[in-house]
Amino acid sequence: MRTPRIIAGAILGAVVAALAGATPALADGGTGAIAGNVRDTRGTVIADAVVTIYPPESSPNIVAQTRTDAAGKFKVIGLDEGSYKVDIRLGGWSEWAPGRIENFDAAPAYPVVPGRTTRASSVVSAPGVITGRLVTATGTPAAGVAVSADEENTARTWSATTAADGTYQVKVHPGGDYIIGFRDGSFQQFAPHTVDRSSARHFTVGSGHTIRVNDRLLPAASLSGRLVDAAGAPVVGAQVHYLTMNASEQATTTDAAGNYSFTKLNPGDIKVYFVTADGVTQWAYQAQSYDEATTFTLTLGQTTTVDDQLLG
């Protein structure tokens, strides 16, 4: 048997063809083909799944790659005689043909002979669905908020964005251990109703099942203030930075009146520093270094005010 032709690191162009029944179709020349259709365990056609052909030995080399069409069908031609494994990549995870196999070693190898088409139809796991509605602290729909479903065991993340009515839907790998997070600007919280990730609930959803996770955004913290020079005049266009205790940092600039503000912030301790247009750096309050700077505490639902005056 000839060794399959390996195209290392290359991805062949999509070759999607309509398949006629279950009768093997002839391939071109001295090569064969692999074809099939993909559905999930609920009978749903899987369109636009990435189908990758690998050699039977454990190898990162790709032999060929295509996508399923709108009917869930795929076909890869031009394969040398040999055996191949077929990987089907869905929304953030993959399974091996004929489906519901996530281990390469457990996947069967499909034989290919010249002039014939080998069938590799698959039934893959239906995703789990996490859906819900997010509202603001005042109860109105929270539109345009980023939603994340973080799988704790694999560190994979699935994401969505809330619609105008605050609803969202995330399709995830079934059976995972998920923490649901919401990010509104710089503010992040976790379901249900906490900014402490360690206090977040863990959610599991089965294949083809749907769970509902509603939540209400907590009132975020904010920071504002004014910077003036040694004579009391507003400092225009100065950079204002706040730095959290875990080294997260954000910046803005002072306006024509020397004012600045940050909204949608998480609670916690911070330090603030200013950089003027001519490169002078000063920490609040009138400090020359981080260690000398005052520590301020941001509180949910409150605005912390940090005014400062440049040293002469």
Image: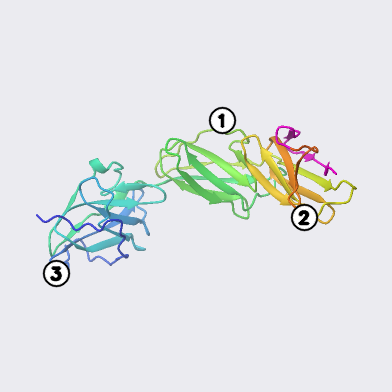
- Quarter the C terminus occupies: top right
- Residue shown at the point (56%, 45%) measured from the top left: 132
Residue 98, horizontal then vertical, whole percent: 25, 49
Spatial CA span between label 2 and label 3 = 70 Å
Callout 1 secondary element: helix
Q: Nearer the viewer, mark 2 or mark 1?
A: 2
Indicate left or right for 290 with 199 as reference: right
Magenta span of residues: 289-312
Q: Main secondary structure of the magenta part?
A: loop
Q: Earlier in the sequence, mark 1 or mark 3?
A: 3
Q: Which residue is mark 3?
A: 29
Vertical relation: 65 (above or below) 127: below
Q: Amino acid at mark 2?
A: Gly
Q: Amino acid at mark 3?
A: Gly
Callout 2 secondary element: loop
Q: Residue furthest right?
A: 231
Q: Which residue is mark 1?
A: 198
Res. 51 image quadrant: bottom left
**Around disc 1, counting alpha carbons within 10 Å, would you say few (fewer than 14), some (14 to 19), or many (20 or more)?**
few
